[in-house]
Each structure stands twice: as structure tokens, then as C-alpha cells.
Amino acid sequence: MQIAVTSDRLRDRIGAWLRRSMLSPGRVAHKIGSDPRAVKNWFAGTNSPRLAEAINLMAECQEFADEINQIVKEIRLARSG
């Protein structure tokens, strides 16, 4: 069985993590050098970060990196079994 990595799945996971993080969209945007409006959309779950933004977010916050790494683990497990 293969787990499909869709933008919807990533967007949902990112939005959920950001809402749990208790950081404001403006603070996240400032920390990673992104547009506050884009980050608000991530919080709302309407969009997900582009690759460069996701990497910067992963570098800034270990919990976010752990979320992405969990998705990767799930995909690897599904492919191996």
C-alpha cells in the first residue's frame, strides 16, 4: 500500500501544527522571513508553504520538522510493507 502525499494532507498537518504551536502568524512569518498573509493562510489551512518556506520553518522549529519527518516515516513504512 502506498500513502499518497497530497497538498491537502500536508496543508492539513501544517495547519493543525501551527494552531497547536500557539505562535501568531506574524511571529512565524518574521522568524522565517515569509509574508504574514501567507502564514495566515497556512494557519487557516487554505494553503501550505512552498518548499523553501517549509525548510526554513523546519530549521526554525523542531516540532514542525518532527511533523514533516513523521509523514516521511509513514510513507516509508507503507512502501516497505
Image (spheres, grey):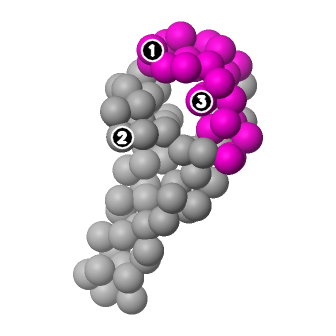
Q: Can you give x and y, in whole percent of width and height, for residue 66 in the image?
A: 43, 43
The correct choice, above or below, for 78 with respect to 59 in the image is below
How far, Cα to Cα, is label 2 from label 1? 14 Å
For marks 2 and 1, the one nearer the N-term is 1
Local crowd size for mark 1, using a 10 Å CA cut-off: few (<14), some (14–19), many (≥20): few
Spot the residue most to the left. Answer: 80
Q: Which residues are magenta?
A: 24-46
Above or below, 48 against 60 in this view is: below
In the picture of the structure, the residue carrying the numbered disc 1 is 33
Q: Is residue 2 left or right of residue 47?
A: left
Q: Which mark is residue 38?
A: 3
| Rendering quarter of residue 42 | top right
Q: Is residue 20 left or right of residue 5?
A: right
Residue type indicated by callout 1: Gly
**Residue 29 seen in this snapshot:** yes
* Residue at 68 percent of width and 46 percent of height: 45
Left or right, 27 with respect to 59, comes to right
Q: Quadrant of residue 71?
A: bottom left
**Amino acid type, callout 2:** Leu
Judging from the image, what secondary structure is the residue with disc 2 in?
A: helix
Residue 11 belongs to magenta span: no
Task: Assess whether mark 1 and mark 3 are in contact (beta carbons under 8 angstroms).
Answer: no
Q: Residue at x 42, y 40 (%)?
A: 50
Q: Is residue 79 above or below residue 51?
A: below
How far from the left and from the top, in percent, is residue 38? Answer: 59, 29
Numbered mark located on residue 54 in the image = none
Image quadrant occupied by the C terminus: bottom left
For the point 70% across and 19% down, the residue is 24
Helix, strand or loop status at disc 3: helix
Residue at the spot of label 2: 51
At label 3, counting other C-alpha atoms closer than 10 Å, the crowd grade (few under 14, some 14-19, many 20 or more) is some
